Amino acid sequence: MSSNSFFSDSEMITGHGDDRYQHPDIRINFSSNVNPNGINSHLTDHLKDCIKGIGSYPEPLARNLAEMIGLKRNLPDGSVFITNGSVEAFYLIAALLTQKRSLIYTPSFSEYADACKAFGHELVFCDNSSFPDVLLDRIDAVWICNPNNPDGKFFDNQILQKQIEQHPATLFILDEAYLDFTSEKRSLAEEAGHLQNLVVINSFTKRYAIPGLRLGYLVSHPDRVRKIQKQVMPWRISTLAIEAGLFCLSEKCRDEFRIQELLKESRRVQTAINRINGFRVHPSETLFFLVEGPVKAAVLKQKLARDHQILIRDASNFRGLSAFHFRISVQLPEENNILINVLDTWK
């Protein structure tokens, strides 16, 4: 495999959200699905205190953080593996399934397909509205984001469990990175620690607003975790990332993440934008949602960035969406009102 084979066909390297590095004057960022309250101030202070720790190597596989997650979530020993962001988990799983047949429900995060392409998978795409009626008899792996990015669709956990039980030869890869952004608190991580055909992937990025630290984890049967450990190099997870994870799971974090208030604000913003002539919102039960606008999303994005220093996510590069789709991740109420007012005067 060549050194650039991971990324030769990738849409996400330059086509993802939070590309504010291309727009240096942005003042309100609606493009990235992270906690609108931002980084916890206690976490920031803790990481400042941990700076001296970068003078030493971190724990090679971040086992201390894996063990803490296992204890917190009542998971079997050896079922948690720490990753360099959730994206690394996608590539590690795809590598275990080299040249297998993968089903991806669309629209969804492009990194699933990119990871599968990097390891020679045969890809099958299916609109997520057809779940769970797709036949899985010849499918080796199913990739599901729950709730789904970019449309916020939630796949019922009871139906998912039934699918997993009925297809023991198919590996289900369940990305729960956005589960904290819903009213649904039922994760399938505990089941993943016991089942041979389930992997649950999660991230610290969204809930704790730390995408730059690159910290995620997967939960799977200990047998699969041992195979994954053989694939990776040591010291992939930095000292500061490990410290951030340990702190976020501790009582010292003391953040005020009020999901019901945030979801109420999301519903308010969705309703307000849907009332604006030319804009149609796809209803979502999360903090982010899709909108179809009156002009191409690329045009709208550039104008908002140039004239108003507002950044949205052009969603036209998601398979199954049109050139007019864009995604909004709600921010604080006063910032949301600015966006609503700007869209209301769109010409």
Image: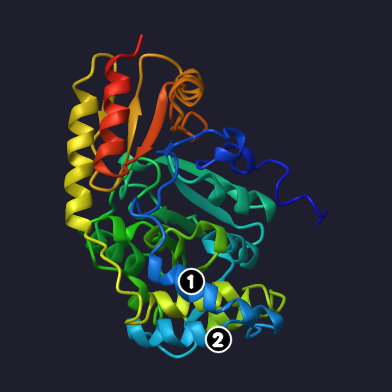
Residue tagged 2? 63
| Residue 244 x, y percent position in the rendering | 49, 73
* Tags 2 and 1 touching, CB below 8 Å: no
Front-lying residue, 288 or 256: 256
| Residue 33 x, y percent position in the rendering | 40, 48
Is 147 situated above or below 306? below
Q: Which residue is drawn at 56% across and 79% down?
A: 50
Q: Is residue 223 visible?
A: yes
Q: Quadrant of residue 284?
A: top left
- Element under label 2? helix
- Element under label 1? strand
Which mark is drawn over residue 218?
1
Quarter of the image with the C terminus in it? top left
Is 162 situated above or below 116? below
Front-lying residue, 104 or 309: 309
- How much space separates mark 2 and mark 1, taking CA atoms? 13 Å
The residue lying furthest to the right in this view is 2
Q: Is residue 82 visible?
A: no
Looking at the rendered structure, the kind of residue marked 1 is Leu
